[in-house]
Image (cartoon, rainbow, N blue to C red):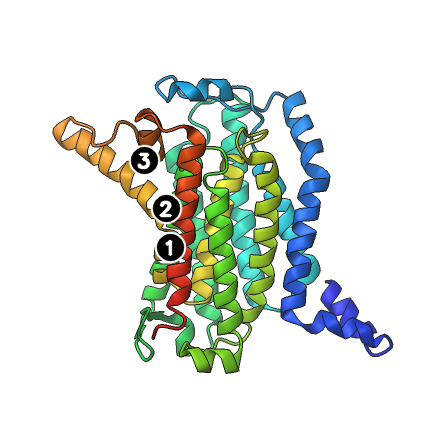
Amino acid sequence: MLTWLFENLSSEYSFLNVFRYLTFRGICGILTAIGICFLFGPVMIRKLSDYQISQTVRSDGPPTHFSKVGTPTMGGALILVSVVVATVLWGDLGNHYIWAILFTTIAFGVIGWVDDYRKLVDKNPRGMGARNKFLFQSISGLIVAGFLYGTASTPAETALLLPLFKEVAVPLGWGFILLTYLVVVGTSNAVNLTDGLDGLAIMPAVMVAGALGVFAYATGHSVFSGYLGIPYIAGAGEVLVFCSALVGAGLGFLWFNTYPAQVFMGDIGALSLGAAIGVVAVIVRQEIVLMIMGGIFVVETVSVILQVASYKLIGRRIFRMAPIHHHFELKGWPEPRVIVRFWIISLILVLIGLSTLKIR
């Protein structure tokens, strides 16, 4: 929105030309999103407390979590609003990738909001129910997958890229829709499973979003993409603005979510964050790299799958509790130690993912 305004005014005020630069608008996106969080975060926390929209804790969970009862939740709405506002202000609204990402983020945010509302306000422990939640996630995921497939103008936009190989791109055809669906819905639920400790999910999400912003900038730049040996996708660079807004909103939310948390994000934040990261990875054609950089999310999800499968098949649990971060808690690790060590692992994985840009 502001991009269009400043472009029209730049002929009279030359200093406004700075807003033509994608990197500058990315910085503006970070500052805008983090500013919104700082400005409205305390108000939101107070309102959530007043309406008693607070965290519930499993009776069989780690004993250290019982003190979290009563902590406000659904704070992910702050992330959602900050990201959307910052993207609309500083992004190019004529770019179809921006609309695809905004639709995905808002759609999964609405699903999370309904689930949280039914759990916390309607006092229904099942929320909207796993089947209904998955149904609406699937519908949203297929809509964005179909949209991206239908608007693709070059083979590179629907081909699967393999890291470390310059000339390898596997044509997917209609398989692109299935892959996009799996990445968006899978990442959404993976982030949701990881969101079990104070700040555990948000910081890896911030790091992955920042790294994907680098991929977006390189993919949408004809010179850099050629130099790095990755396909050039026109318009993909604009995704950097969204990634920057997500980084700013995530850091702003972490200010209140860091241990001991003043607020939790709830499904409204976790589901929308994961879906947003997934669709960005699809747009910049880095689905495999996403699995590397988001390795913490993958491990958390796999730990739940293994735990359930083991219990149903042989009647025994592999971990003391799943997702795996609870396993380490029950082994005696203090919560801050689990969180920071998972953050460090995430940073390492993100750096490995970024290195694939050059190692080809």
Q: Is residue 132 visible?
A: no
Going by the image, does 285 lie left or right of 24?
left
Snapshot quadrant of residue 355: bottom left
User: What amino acid is at disc 3?
Assistant: Ile
> To which residue does mark 2 refer?
296
Snapshot quadrant of residue 133: top left
Going by the image, does 111 lie left or right of 312?
right
Snapshot quadrant of residue 28: bottom right
User: What amino acid is at disc 1?
Assistant: Leu
| Nearer to the camera, 266 or 63 | 63
Secondary structure, mark 1, is helix
Mark earlier in primary sequence (1, 3): 3
Going by the image, does 171 lie left or right of 351?
left
Mark earlier in primary sequence (2, 1): 2
C-alpha span from label 2 to label 1: 9 Å
Secondary structure, mark 3, is helix
> To which residue does mark 3 refer?
324
> To which residue does mark 1 refer?
349
Tell me where residue 149 appears, x and y as whole percent: 43, 67
User: What amino acid is at disc 2?
Assistant: Ile
C-alpha span from label 1 to label 3: 18 Å
Going by the image, does 279 lie left or right of 316?
right
Tell me where residue 140 appears, x and y as whole percent: 46, 51
